Image (cartoon, rainbow, N blue to C red):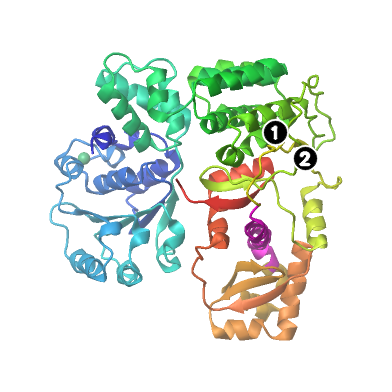
Amino acid sequence: MAAQSLYRKWRSQTFDELVGQEHVVQTLRNAVIEGRVAHAYLFTGPRGVGKTTMARLLAKAVNCLATDPASRPCGSCASCVAIAEGRAVDVIEMDAASHTSVEDAREIIERVQFRPAEGRAKVYVIDECHQLSAAAFNALLKTLEEPPDHAIFILATTEVHKVPATILSRCQRFTFTRHGVAATAEHLRRIAAAEGLELAEGVPEAIARAATGSMRDALGVLEQLASFASGPITLDQVHSLLGMTAAAEVQALVEALLDGDAGAALRAVNGVAEQGADIRQFTRDLVERLRSLLLLLASGDHGLADIGADELRLMEGWAARADVPRLLAWVRIFSALDFQLRTTPYGHLPLELAVVEALVTEPQATASGEVARPAPRPAPVPSRPTPSRPTPSRPAAHPVVSPPPPRVEAPEAVASEQAQLGAAAPEPEPFVATAPVSTAAPEPPPPVARSADAAAANADFTVLERVIDSWELIKRDVRPLKRTIEALLKDVRPIDVEGNTIVLLAASTFHKTNIEQPQNREIVEAVIKKHLGAAYAIRCTIEAKTEARDLRGQIREARKDALVRAAMNIFDAHIVDIEPEE
Ligand SMILES: [Zn+2]
């Protein structure tokens, strides 16, 4: 595939060349230098962030012929070159997606017993390892239990929850993160310069933003642009390739919002609509901008806000004129629009209404009791539509993070959670006040059952996460009450919450039976109540449930994603729905 070739060509050949993942590089490099490379690694993270590149670097490092361990992999010795060219017999790369049978895994086992032919170590790189069959996993597990000295397994996966716990526990695990816009843009600039490609200002950032953290995708886009561009690559070309709206229009709208100028804001929206641009994409770009601005203002951290070098000055200028409560309200208003824009028969009307709504809405008092500066003078509101209850939104692909749904926890649990957060103030209800005005258009009925399920799942997993966080303390507090239970609890861990019941995974029937004896159960439940501030029953199971692929299971997994967690924390939000990627 042509789009892949730049990525291949510029694949890092040494640890120094690698972009991002500094935490992984540091640890692996030290392991190589100190000669304590583990027998099994698991690299997890989204696609295109460098997992297999890192696996190859490690494979090279352990077989590199450079005399100084600190300079391994050197990228130039016979071994490094052979691995880079994919002809090293001691480095076996397989894609589990196409090798899922138990025979393949057996073959690995058989081969692993032989000493390496040329290098010091035999390295197995198993990509998308979550796709191995259960039987193949078992075969692999046996090898991992007693790996030959010369064997190193590097497993990579985008879906770590599908990897059995028995395998996980035998691997040193590294989580790979998405590349930031600035780092990706910088890398694109370097490669473009080396390839003799000229990029107009803002192009690397636009590509980086569209690639959402995947270097492979970013280089794929650059490659496509290079293939049809004669002369410098312009922003317009990027936008027409990616269907993105010109940053200038988004910029004009943000300016107008900051000025409180409803006329200018509506003109910007209409300008975009008249060009026939995708209003949904425009709104997403707007939300992305506002989000960056919010993160910059709230944290003062350019890295967190993921702002490219080209727009730092612009964003800082905006930040000086913005305030957190207004931005928070705007992000909420505009991010709730996606679903409406997809279903409305009224074109860009929902966006126009949202713009007006954004400018007339008084931001809520902040948590510290400060009231934000007053909103600009109300603009005239089109009279046609009547405000109505916001529809539970189902916006873009990926986990859909939205304001908290109605809580289903017992009132005392809610109260204690607030107490814990130090938010003794009356329950804030920012979402009612700042909710988007919905269109007058008839909308499909809200997915009530689904959102109720989502609310229940979110409530359960919130409790579960608190139990997990407190588990060590709970065990500690059980100890003085009854040491034998504390001893039993060492082999028990919380794995689920179902309403008012906490489900514990016990190592054996012995553990389960003893913990569930009424007098023992009462002790554990009492300590849990002390830590959570609410009463929960406990139930033991000896079988870890496989992850359900229903909504509940998906929400559970989505909550583990760092980006989703960040969004939930920033907006005090919960996941209301999950949509398949389009
Ligand atoms: Zn080398």
**What residue lies at 37% left-to-right and 21% top-to-bottom?**
237
Q: Secondary structure at mark 2?
A: helix
Dot 1: element: helix
Q: Which is nearer the N-term, disc 2 or disc 1?
A: 1
Relative horizontal placement of residue 145, taking residue 227 as reference (left or right): right
Q: Are marks 2 and 1 in contact (CB under 8 Å)?
A: yes
Magenta-colored segment: predominant secondary structure: helix
Q: Which residue is mark 2?
A: 430
**Where, quadrant-wise, is the C terminus in this rendering?**
top left
Asked if residue 566 lies left or right of residue 389, the reply is left
- x and y, in percent, of residue 411 in the image: 82, 61
Where is mark 1, residue-wise? 328
| Quadrant housing residue 503 | bottom right
Q: Between 61 and 543, which is closer to the camera in this rendering?
A: 543
- Magenta residues, start to end: 446-474
Q: Residue 400 at what x, y percent from top left?
A: 58, 47
Observer able to see residue 66 = no
Q: Using the rendered view, name the quadrant where residue 361 is placed.
A: top right
